[in-house]
Image (cartoon, helix red, strand yellow):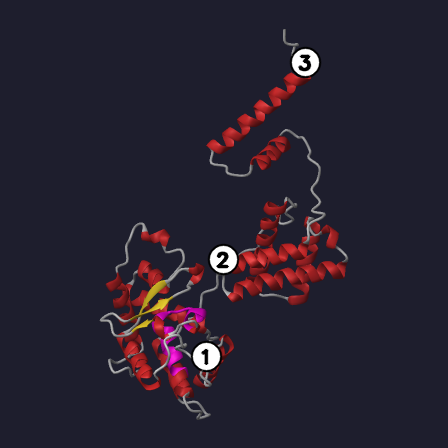
Amino acid sequence: MNAAVSPLQAADRAALTSLQEAIGDARTRGDRRPAFTLIAACLDELGIALPERSGRGVSLEQARQEWLGRVRSANRSESALRAYRVAIDDLFSFLERAGRRDSVFREETIVAYLEDYRRRAQPAPATYYRHFTGLRRFFRWLSRRAGTPDPFLDLETPSNPRTEATWLTAEEFGRLLEAASSPPKRRRGLAERDRLVLLALVATGLRRSELIATDWADLDLDNQQPSLLVRAGKGGKARRQPLPKALADELRGLHERIRPAADAPVFCGLEGGRLQPAILANIITRAAERSGLEKHITAHTLRHTAATWLRQETGDARLVAAYLGHADLSTVSRYAHVADNELHSAAAAIATRVNMGTDGSSS
């Protein structure tokens, strides 16, 4: 005959049954947190305190390397990777100065750091928002991966400033283009290169990194609908970018003159190497200064200009999203499909704003 079940064993069975039911209920509600996380939450609701996690034994340097590697493997931009690296390194530097390395997983340490960062760097609201959210993502990942406390868990997220992006009117872009076409230093190929870069940015709405990465093999210039292949857009997604016919004609003419290799870059420095981000920024800055425009103009300004002109010409937000290769286009594609011929019509619509003639000229 089996021995009688003791009261202690009965209590154990009841506890396990309760936890099983709690996990089953959570799954039914769509809660996909790990089982032990759900158990911990159940115990907390019952007023049962768990031992505080300290995070001791976790290598911050190793976590930093793994996190940055994760960001890099996700095909995030170099600027995003740099922002994460700068934020984490700045925090680590503070921990060393303040002697608070052992308390990095405590909320009060992060609050002290953020106050120190604001005092030292005096960041703009948008910069502070990116700094805060970058660190929060790192610690959220580390908490899930290593079971460390998340010091950002109960911190209120700063407001995300949504300033209106700068864009240029057709007249302002004409001034910018004229300034680029007439540089004070007459270096061979300088004016032609700078002018072509500006036209390409505003006619295609390409991101800076997408323009720089374009090779001649990516161009399809002889098709009735010319285009270029963006091999690594945001999120690592490839797409076909329509080209206005006038821009395609200009690129075809350049190709016939220089006869480049297929894997050669389309947009180059004056020595023939691939255009670098700093040089691209200088092209735009020099032209902006000589044009007399008071707006702060970057490659992203020209991308936003393309978006604004296209929206004004068509009034179609889904077309703008498709033309610019927005990563979240899926949110509208379920309801409205964008056909290829619509995108090429969009390219032509943008070209009209800068009066790009069929011979490749512009005014």
Which of the numbered marks, if any, corresponds to residue 89? Answer: none
Which of the numbered marks, if any, corresponds to residue 6? Answer: 3
Q: What amino acid type is highlighted by mark number 1? A: Ile
Q: Tell me if residue 194 comes above or below residue 217 in the rendering.
A: below
- 206 sits left or right of 223 in the view: right
Q: What amino acid type is highlighted by mark number 3? A: Ser
Q: What amino acid type is highlighted by mark number 2? A: Ala
Determine contact: label 3, label 2, CB under 8 Å: no
Q: Secondary structure at mark 1?
A: helix
Residue at image mark 2: 74
Q: Write down the region rendered in magenta.
A: 194-211
Which image quarter holds the C terminus? bottom left
Magenta highlight: main SS: helix
- Can residue 127 be seen in this snapshot? no
Calculate the distance from the C-alpha at mark 3 to the C-alpha at mark 2.
55 Å
Q: Residue at x 40, y 58 (%)?
A: 327
Calculate the distance from the C-alpha at mark 1 to the C-alpha at mark 3.
81 Å
User: Outermost residue, right direction?
Assistant: 99
Q: Secondary structure at mark 3?
A: loop
Q: Position of residue 50 (x, y in %)?
A: 68, 35
- Judge by depth and name the residue closer to the eye, 176 or 217: 217
Q: Position of residue 185 (x, y in %)?
A: 46, 92
Q: Earlier in the sequence, mark 2 or mark 1?
A: 2
Confirm whether the magenta stretch covers residue 207: yes
Q: Tell me if residue 50 comes above or below residue 145 in the rendering.
A: above
Foreground mark, 1 or 3?
A: 3
Residue at image mark 1: 284
